[in-house]
Amino acid sequence: MSNYGFIKSETVVLFVHKFKFTIPFGLLWDGFDKYLDVGLLNRQWNNGKGNSMKLQKAKAATMIAAGFAFAILVLLMACGSGISQTQPQPTSGATPAVHVCQFRPVNGAWKGSCGRLGGQNPALTIAPAKAITTGVWRNGVNPTAVWAGEITYSDDKDQIEIEIYAGGSGVLRNSDGWFPVSNFVLSTNALECQIDFAHEVPPSDLDRQIVQRAAVILSSESVWNRADTRECAAAGTKWSIYCAMQRATVEVSGAFHHRRPALQLVRKIVEERSGGRSYTHRLMDYNNDPSTRLEDVRTLFAEALARIGR
């Protein structure tokens, strides 16, 4: 029993490589305690008081405890900063959030890679283009350069458009969404940029106008198409949520892109509202759901407008 008054209920957590050891502090302290007792026993032995069998056994036991405690302390000191916490190691083959994309000129185009995408390392091919074909991004701001091309996967190809603005920032558009581009640098023999595939571009003021226009297009039961197929007739007189958004996008921005921020925001709200329901196509299935009312459609657009305003 120690007479030093220390609390022994605490523990020391030790990480050695991938293994974790939780050691009662009392065990360590008892080792010290026994070590001090060893010193006392030694003095008794040297003074001629160590001739009893009991004293010999006590000395042997305390020597073992002290040795065990010191072995643990040496391990603790060797591990250094690993005592308090472990640092997570990146998973092999993990996809980074921001991709560094590098290209070289090849036969009139620019070929390169952005690293790991969709579990693969696809090749990218881009070339200068005259203009963006899938709708204006923002009012009153024109890109300084436009590029178009494709991402080639082992089993698919994804069409892309890139618009660059002053300062080297911009947007990449593909079938998954619109993603921020930064640090775009072009030289004679190299093109490099960074693309954040983990975060989509937020809606712009033009996206606000699109949602406002869609709310006007789909404003009554008489024009609501409750059997959407996502095939929108240009001369149609009835509109689903998807087709109202498509028509509004063309009217406001000049062209349509399936993953424009305005549509992505409306999809996100539908996903939040329909938790637990198995929707294959969020806008179409929510539109066709018998439980969806016109008031739900109106509040869907209203909520999207409120979020754009935040």
Image (tube, rainbow, N blue to C red):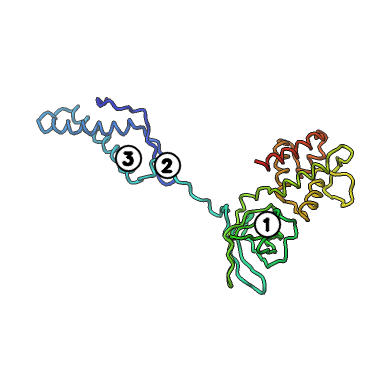
- Where is mark 2, residue-wise? 85
Q: Secondary structure at mark 2?
A: loop
Task: Looking at the picture, tell me which residue is in the foreground, 31 or 279.
Answer: 279
Q: Position of 183 compared to 273: left or right?
A: left
The spot of residue 304 in percent (x, y) is 72, 41
Q: Residue at x 64, y 69 (%)?
A: 110
Residue marked by disc 3: 72
Query: How many neighbours does mark 3 have within 10 angstroms: few (below 14), some (14-19), or many (20 or more)?
Result: some
Image: 53 above or below 197: above
Label 3: element kind:
helix
User: What residue is pinned by disc 1?
Assistant: 141
Would you say residue 280 is visible in this rendering?
no
Residues under numbered marks 3 and 1 in contact, where contact means CB atoms less than 8 Å apart: no
Can you tell which quarter of the image residue 223 is in?
top right
In which quadrant of the rendered image does the C terminus lie?
top right
First in sequence: mark 1 vs mark 2: 2
Q: Residue furthest left?
A: 47
Q: Residue at x 68, y 67 (%)?
A: 128
Whichever of callouts 3 and 1 sits on the residue coming sooner in the sequence is 3
Give, as a three-letter code, the residue at label 1. Answer: Val
Of the residues shown, which amino acid type is indicated by label 2?
A: Gln
Instruction: Report how far apart the C-alphas of labels 2 and 3 lie in the structure.
Output: 18 Å
